[in-house]
Amino acid sequence: MLTKEATTMTQEKPILRIENISKTLGGKEILKSVSLSLKKGELKVLIGPSGAGKSTLLQCINFLLPPDSGRVWLDGVEIQNRRKRDLYAFRQQVGMIFQDFNLFDHLDALENVAIALRKVKKMRRPEARDRAMAELERVGLEDKINLYPAELSGGQKQRVSIARALAMDPKIMLLDEPTSALDPELIGEVLSVIRDLAHGGMTMILATHQIAFTRSLAHEVIFLENGIILEQGTPAELLSPDACTRSKDFCSRLDDLCEEKG
Amino acid sequence: MFDTLSAILEALPYLLEGALVTVGIVIGAMGIGLIIGIHMAVGQIYGNRAVRWAVGFYVWFFRGVPVLVLLFLFYFGLFALIGLNLSAFAASILVLGMTTAAYQSQIFRGAMLSLPRGQFQAAKALGMSDLTAIISIILPQALRFSIPAWSNEYSIILKDSALAFVLGTSEIMARSHFVASRTYHHLPLYITAGCLYFILTWLGVRALLKLEEKVRIPGYAH
Ligand SMILES: Nc1ncnc2c1ncn2[C@@H]1O[C@H](COP(=O)(O)OP(=O)(O)OP(=O)(O)O)[C@@H](O)[C@H]1O
Ligand SMILES: [Mg+2]
């Protein structure tokens, strides 16, 4: 059974809440009691150096990596990840986007989106395909539905993977550096899909190094380092040129790097 | 010369019937091996310790003992012991099937392990159970990649099926031997037997190559 969380809060309840998530991997403490919460429609951006634990945190939230300790609530209901049915039902409501897309190589774009509708939501094939078609249209790929992953560009693959997640009607989305594996000229098309999602009110946690994007769209920036949330605040507070924060230092170093490359 | 030719021609219908028996043994054995092999591969990768140990033991046993010994062991020994009264034909299928299952499980296991891990993660992130992800995402790809090695296994089992002769299964080898020892045309008959195996190997390998092409994932370069 799911346990209802007693809510004493007067303001709007968070849609997702995680509390004291810890995770040790290979003898090293990767996450040290991390807590955060999101309200409906919020976009929180996770930044931090490589190895900070961003991917680990996102994977702990949907239990792809079971945390050693900590609790997760969705819509006020605590997730009992040991109960398989509850876990699978929870994961359906949490869309996940990976850095390297992870499309199903043996299925074309349409089936990549439709398969979970059929196998998880038990939709019938024609309805699943209709729904998949609609999601692919939403990410601008209506003319690519019959291409296989190996025939798509990186940006197109990532858009298929976003369509695949959206088809499940998730309540929140976790995006793990969705543009990091892309050639610079393909980043824009993916960011623009994510921007549309944000404007459409999708609740998201986004790990990214795209600072300009973060400045313009994030409701909150979370700076993670060595498995600890060091700083947390609005982009204005943390990233403005005169802010004396670790986040700003980190981001200006990133900007320098970009300039060197460019 | 004419003598030889007529001996072959006379024996040919009889030998071709034997070829059907051989084909039956091979299809049966490969089918059993496919079904058991897939389950064992999944068990060895995703199963708990007991399952992994059991599969490991099975593979170790069937790969470690010669097929000839296995045929005798099961047909005259174990099957009789458990009161299973099988024909030589059925026993040959079963023993060869169990043997190829050990090899096939390792073919499938290798193919499954060679898939990028991320697809399994992505499937689970969509709410699929492990089993659903294995059935709809992992196996369709792993089985495709297994076809070349499976084709190799087919040609081995086809030739191993000649050993079924020792149980009295009336396949190509048994019939060639029978006719040869009666007519003393040893050379022409065993050449004919060899040719039949050669043709069956060629047909099977070709069919599997066709299958491989048919199910190739578009755009996928190896
Ligand atoms: N399976 C594992 N076993 C041991 N250590 C691991 C494992 N997975 C990750 N780590 C370690 O955990 C740390 C955090 O990894 P994580 O992938 O979460 O970082 P990240 O913030 O996402 O970095 P990046 O920006 O490079 O993606 C790293 O030091 C990594 O080496
Ligand atoms: Mg990462």
Image (cartoon, grey):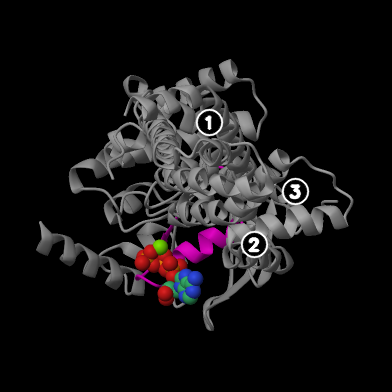
Q: Nearer the viewer, residue B57 or B116?
A: B57
Determine contact: label 2, label 3, CB under 8 Å: no
What percent of the width, then of the height, locates residue B116?
Answer: 43, 53
Q: Name the residue under label 1.
A: B19
Q: How far apart are marks 2 and 1 (CA)?
A: 24 Å
Q: Which of B188 and A125 is in front in this view?
A: B188
Determine contact: label 2, label 1, CB under 8 Å: no
Q: Mark 2 points at which residue?
A: B69
B215 displayed left or right of B98: left
Determine which of the numbered discs, if any, sits on residue B139 in the image. Answer: none
What percent of the width, then of the height, locates residue B104?
Answer: 54, 51
Q: What residue type is labelled 2?
A: Val
Q: In which quarter of the image is ligand 2?
A: bottom left
B90 displayed left or right of A247: right
Q: What residue type is labelled 3?
A: Asp
Task: Locate the C terminus of chain B and report the quarter of the image it occupies.
Answer: top left
Q: Where does the magenta region start and end?
A: A40-64
- Discs 2, 3: same chain: no
What percent of the width, then of the height, locates residue B66?
Answer: 58, 63
Q: Is mark 3 within 8 Å of ligand 1?
A: no
**Mark whose residue sits in front, 1 or 3:** 1
Q: What element carries label 2?
A: helix
Image point 27% across, 52% down: which residue?
A212
Chain of the residue under the numbered disc 3 shown in the image: A
How many residues crowd mark 2 within 10 Å: few (<14), some (14–19), many (20+)?
few
Q: Name the residue under label 3.
A: A86
Q: Is residue A174 above or below residue A124?
A: below
